[in-house]
Image (cartoon, grey):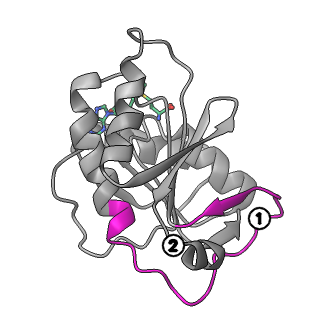
Amino acid sequence: MGPRSIISSGTGALAIFLQKLLEVDITTSDFDDEEVEDNISHNCRVNGISPVLPHIRHSWGDNFQITDPDWDLVIASDILLYVKQYPNLIKTLSFLLKSYKIKDKKPGSTGSDVQLPWPAFLMSWRRRIGKDDDALFFTGCKDAGFVVEHLGSRVYCISLKKTKNAEEDTKATI
Ligand SMILES: C[S@@+](CC[C@H](N)C(=O)[O-])C[C@H]1O[C@@H](n2cnc3c(N)ncnc32)[C@H](O)[C@@H]1O
């Protein structure tokens, strides 16, 4: 199974849950803020994850600390509250997905039957904000060259546009 990253992890609850459930290689990320990082580390430790999950401080739109992102799946939940930040968020997603180098080997299976393109951004979003505001995010993603798929239950998959052959090559079971 390939490495995954969770952006804007907040308390780290989703990352901790996924790591404990699936034992995936997860990196957390959130604002460039020491207290947020310390809080995620604390939550890892009290949940029996030691060493704590790797963490990258990153505010959307800023340069990432690394130049070669290697995460086949970028995951987030509940992050579309900040409408003015959508262009920065899309800039970060563009970097993470467009700089990813497709490898020969497909990411492995976790036993689920859900097929996802890779690299991909998987996001859940339920909160209601201003009418149609969240649509601005999805339009911005399409304008940036992404394909947006609603997988159901307000879970969205955002991935790069691909040629038909490339699409066959880069579908993997997560
Ligand atoms: C509502 S919380 C959701 C936290 C977590 N994803 C969850 O579902 O529990 C929104 C998260 O987005 C992060 N966030 C907001 N603006 C951000 C920005 N400009 N750059 C990076 N993270 C940001 C916040 O720090 C916070 O962790």
Mark yes or no: residue 23 visible.
yes
Magenta-tinted stretch: 96-118
Q: Residues within 10 Å of mark 1 (few under 14, many from 20)?
A: few
| Secondary structure of the residue carrying numbered label 2 | loop
The quadrant of the picture showing ligand 1 is top left
The residue lying toward the viewer, choosing from 2 and 171, is 171
Q: Is residue 154 left or right of residue 142?
A: right
Residue 83 in percent (x, y) is at: 28, 23
Q: Amino acid at mark 1?
A: Thr
Is residue 169 shown left or right of residue 36?
right
Residue 164 lies within the magenta run: no
Name the residue beneath numbered marker 2: 163
User: Which of the image's four quarters has the C terminus?
Assistant: bottom right
Q: In the rendered view, does 162 fall on the left or right side of 170?
A: left
Residue 13 image-quadrant placement: top right
Residue marked by disc 1 = 110
> Residue 16 appears at what percent x and percent y?
59, 47
